[in-house]
Amino acid sequence: MPNYLCSLFFSNSKEKYDEIFFKSQSIFGFEPEVMDIYVNNETGLLSDLKYSPDGLGDYLRKIPSSIGIKSKPYDELPGYFWFKRKIIPEYDIYHVAWFNDNLNFILNSKFFHNLLTDDGFIYGFCCNSEDMQDQSTENVRYLQNKFPDLTIKVKKNARGFLVADTSENWGRSIYAGGIDFMAAPNMWFGKVFFEIISKDKLLSFPLASQIQSDNTAIVQIKLFDMYVNPVNEENRKQQKEFWKFFDYQNVIDRFKNKREEEIGITDFSKSLASGNKEKKKRSWPW
């Protein structure tokens, strides 16, 4: 059975958005059993701790950068569902995500609508998590093992190693400036995102609509039903159209360069950050 990911990104205000985290505990969509805590590099990742609200509160006082709430330990698949809260301090981003075999419990809630219309909301999406992984990975061996009949286009990365070329994978996700960008089945864009792509430009996309609340309006783009196989030709066509319509790769590149300039990342530190990011990625299944 496929699992689905819902990711929301906010301008970070820890004091404010930890309220989101605590309220989210009432709608995880599963019974929490264990949790993973990542405080910092010195502490490392603490895996499969027994979940309790009181114990979680003790860890929150240490200001961890990542918290994952799970229904059971990772090595007890299937039936592995979770909620994740993460702070990306270098970019001042607060990230919350749900991972489940069905996301209607959160998507149909008033709580979710309130998140989308929050002043600090930047951007969010829902997608088939496995497809996002398959479309985004540059790991040639992984792709060869999973898709033995697939012809894999390769390129050399910045370090000279051969990797899969994902430039025409229309379901890929790209991390830039603390945000994961993709042409997801369901996407929402808040007023903060309008500094990246204008509201008028977003609304000019044929599948865009506006969600209005008392104080703000956001843009929703629904490319196709999230629960339908994204590999379908028509669905890939919609994703490709999104990338082309917004010249999305250039949008992402400009945003990435702007954010890195703002925090003073040099070419050398970019290389180090890239290596650290890959290590952190391996600590989480997405």
Image: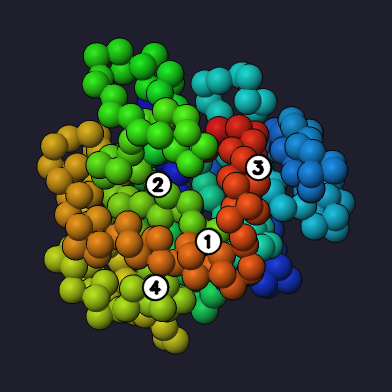
Mark number displayed over residue 28: none
N-terminal of the two: label 2 or label 4? 2
Give amino acid for label 2: Ser
Amino acid type at image mark 1 = Gly
- Residue at x-position 25% and y-position 80%: 200
Corner quadrant of residue 255 = bottom left
Relative depth, front residue between 214 and 190: 190
Query: How far from the left and from the top, in percent, is residue 174?
Result: 42, 49
Report if the CB atoms under discs 1 and 2 are less than 8 Å apart: no
For label 1, the residue is: 177
Which residue has dot 3 on it? Answer: 276
**Cα distance in 3D space between marks 1 and 2:** 13 Å
Amino acid type, label 4: Ile
**Which sits in the foreground, 285 or 35?**
285
In the picture of the structure, the residue carrying the numbered disc 2 is 173
Q: Residue furthest bottom?
A: 215
Q: Amino acid at mark 3?
A: Asn
